[in-house]
Image: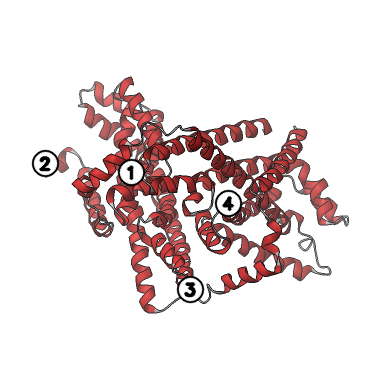
Amino acid sequence: MRPLSTLLSIVFLALAALSVQYLSLDLMRFFAPDSLKQMLAYIVSFFPPDLSSEYLSRIAQGTVETLAISDIGNGLAAIFGLLLALPAAGRLGPVLRAIARFFLNFLRSVPELVWAAIMVLAAGLGPLAGTLALAAHTTGVLGRLFGETLENTPPEPALALLHSGSPRMAAFMYGTFPGIFPQLIAYTLYRWENNIRMATILGFVGAGGLGQMLYFSLSLFQQQQAFTVILAMLFLVAIVDAISAWLRGRYIE
Amino acid sequence: MLLAERDPAALPRLALTIIVLFLLWPALNLTEFNPAVLFETNNRKIMGQFLSSFFPLNLSPDFLKLVWKSTLETLALATAGTALAMFIAFPAALMLARSLSISSIGPGPGRLIGQFIRIPVRWILIVLRSIPEIVWALLFVRAVGLGPAAGVLAIAITYSGMLGKVYSEILESGDTRPARALLETGSGRLAAFSYGILPGALHELVSYSVYRWECAVRASVIMGFVGAGGLGQLMELSMRMLSGGEVSTILLTFLLLVLLADAVSAILRKALE
């Protein structure tokens, strides 16, 4: 199989060369002394980050807003994902199964940023658009993952309850749900980590949070403020990763 | 009390639910959560017009030509970006990989430098990959102007951080004894890499690079939204002009493109196994 890898590498390099030519990218242009100097000046203009207390308090506000967008978006997605996972796992008949799967696929295949652009039109500029966009895409993702979990869980506990006469709802709540709950939490946490990253970005199309601040400050050529926002983004992602890892260790493993 | 007797787990669950809701309440306020906005007559009218203009798709030859051009641009952008990222990532991975470390063999000239050069390289890679590609794209659009060049650079920067890390992990994870033997008998790093590690690690390296290329295709569509060229930029324009027929055509193209990249990558990676 080694020839295949070698062949692939060569084909890929050829394609890359073609691409550079197609885009008429003049890579050398970036390394010309003039543009290097400009680039350097641009980089230097980001330093030092704006750490005035007044701006930091606005950053804090933006950070909390981003956190809220990802929280609510993810929470809504978990609820609707579970609701759609039931038909998608075939619990309510084959017709509903097909419909639910199609709907979930559709939600999932439109990227968050496109949802955000659409939601900005529907709900106006601001955090609500970002929240709904995250909820829409994540419902598709979680619905599918939850559905798979439901399909893979052993049916015996619920069947035992059903056969001894318990109603369907109770059989699900006490026979199935406790078994799948840790898995649902694991998936939700995993998406939350993803969504906090997305929530910082959705602001680029006007959906609130840190992204919107970054977009504004870069548009106004306030690089020092922009740098602070980028630092806040990195900080937020690191914190969320840590929290999520802690929750995972505590409740899942 | 009755509830608790029938179901001992009910009260703790209820309490947990209430606590979660209580914690989420401020978040609901912060996100200005009010779905009713969606149904205000004004918003509903704009949205209704926009959505109903999604059909029929805009399939006029002129527009399709434009879409085709943007699709090629997206693919070229992703490919060029990934290739550039590989060129940066590869030397970095060679420097980082512990299995190719001469300084860890024992004392010798240049040992200190060898041990310390790794730290800045590792940190640079972390910085490169922890800023999302679309943020890089936004920065580069300001620096080199609108168009695919910004996208290529953004992909190259972010992905070199990811590829560098993963490449170095791959170089460390296989059988490292041949390389070690070569190094200890005095061969150089490059020779130790080419004859000691590459034969065993090539598949994994290529396989991961193909996967990253697939991710780059997806990312480059998105990056267009901040002006970094390709399908995304076209979609952003159509969206601004509220021409739904164009948006739906681009969305469909986008889905096909992603499916195609998925399939190509899956087939190639399967063949590599």
Instruction: Identify the secondary structure beneath mark 4.
Output: helix
Residues B4 and A133: in front is A133
Kindly tell me whether residue A252 is visible in this rendering: no
Looking at the image, residue A13 sits to the left or right of residue A191; the answer is right
| Residue visible at 35% across and 47% down in the picture | A133
Left or right, residue B191 beside residue B48:
right
Mark 2 surroundings within 10 Å by alpha-carbon count, few (fewer than 14), some (14 through 19), many (20 or more): few
Dot 4 or dot 2: first in sequence order is 2
Chain for numbered disc 1: A
Q: Which residue is mark 2?
A: B2
Q: Residues within 10 Å of mark 4 (few under 14, many from 20)?
A: many
* Same subunit: marks 4 and 2: yes
Residue under label 4, please give it: B148
**Is disc 1 placed on a helix, strand or loop?**
helix
Image x and y of residue A50, in percent: 45, 76
- In the rendered image of this protein, does residue B95 appear above or below residue A6? below
Between label 4 and label 1, give the one nearer the viewer. 4
List the residue tagged with mark 1: A77
